[in-house]
Amino acid sequence: MRTLLVTALLVLAATGCGPKLADCEALASEQAACMNDVAKADCEATNTQCSDVAGGEVLVLESCPLQFACSEP
């Protein structure tokens, strides 16, 4: 029974039932021209905000500098 529960939790984690956060470091390297210190801090703050929302997703707004928002399900 315990193995089944652990397997179910791993499947739920792998299928993305939790928040979908932005990889701020990857965005900073991929979009260096549009990812200044303020945008990176905003990305990290939005990740923190979204991590408290089950099913929340960090949206990256295509602007320069990049902007971030947390969508709620």
Image: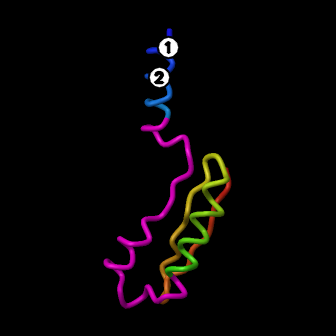
Determine whether label 1 and label 2 are within 8 Å by CB.
yes
Residue 6 image label: 2
Task: Check disc 2 and give the amino acid type.
Answer: Val
Give the vertical position of 56 relative to 47 (above or below): above
x and y percent of residue 34 in the render? 42, 88
x and y percent of residue 45 in the render? 61, 71
x and y percent of residue 18 in the render? 56, 45
Give the vertical position of 73 relative to 25 (above or below): above
Distance in Å between CA atoms under marks 1 and 2: 6 Å
Task: Name the residue rendered at 52%, 83% in the picture.
Answer: 39
- For mark 1, give the secondary structure: helix
Q: Which residue is mark 1?
A: 2
- For mark 2, give the secondary structure: helix
Give the vertical position of 45 relative to 38 (above or below): above
Task: Name the residue rendered at 39%, 72% in the picture.
Answer: 25
Q: State the extent of the magenta-drawn residues as a range.
A: 13-39
Q: Is residue 27 magenta?
A: yes
Of the pair 61 and 12, the residue shown nearer to us = 12
